[in-house]
Image (tube, grey):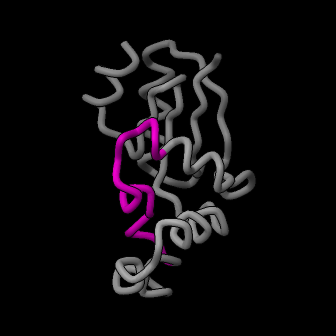
Amino acid sequence: MSVLFVCYPKCGTCRKAEKWLKDHGLAYDKRDISIDQPTEAELREWKEKSGLPLKKFFNTSGQIYRQNQLKDKLPGMTEDQQFALLAESGMLVKRPILVDGDTVLVGFKEKDYEESLL
């Protein structure tokens, strides 16, 4: 099973993460989140494997998050509603997401990549 790297090519953090992967000679399949957004089923699986709270999957600095005032709305939403919302727009999902078997990393922290992939 190959590593899946879900990113947005214009995102600086995604570019840093991809450079890290290349610098360490790691093979991966790249998926542009703006064209091929994660499904609700994928998001549910990734959340489970990551062990992270669902809120960590939201791109809280993105325009859609701010425009829709999701900071105030999310606490009143069910988990099912939040998953459905994330599946509607790839741009609402925090990135990059790296999926390697049972390991799922959200965002890019060099230390986490090193501990999980090297």
Location of residue 41 in the rendering, given as x and y in whole percent from the top left corner: 65, 49
Q: Pick the residue in front: 43 or 36.
A: 43
User: Residue 57 vs residue 86: left or right?
Assistant: left
Location of residue 74 in the rendering, given as x and y in whole percent from the top left corner: 40, 77
User: Residue 64 vs residue 24: left or right?
Assistant: right
Residue drawn at (35%, 21%) of the image: 116
User: Residue 112 vs residue 78: left or right?
Assistant: left
Residues shaded magenta: 47-63
Residue drawn at (50%, 53%) of the image: 11
Residue 104 colored magenta?
Answer: no
Q: Could you tell me which quadrant the C terminus lies in?
A: top left
* Residue 86: quarter of image: bottom right
Q: Could you tell me which quadrant the N terminus lies in?
A: top right
Note whether 37 is above or below 89 in the view shown.
above
Residue drawn at (57%, 35%) of the image: 5
* Residue 69: quarter of image: bottom left
In the displayed image of the protein, which residue is found farthest to the right?
35
In the displayed image of the protein, which residue is found farthest to the left?
111
Q: Pick the residue in front: 109 or 88.
A: 88
Residue drawn at (35%, 47%) of the image: 52
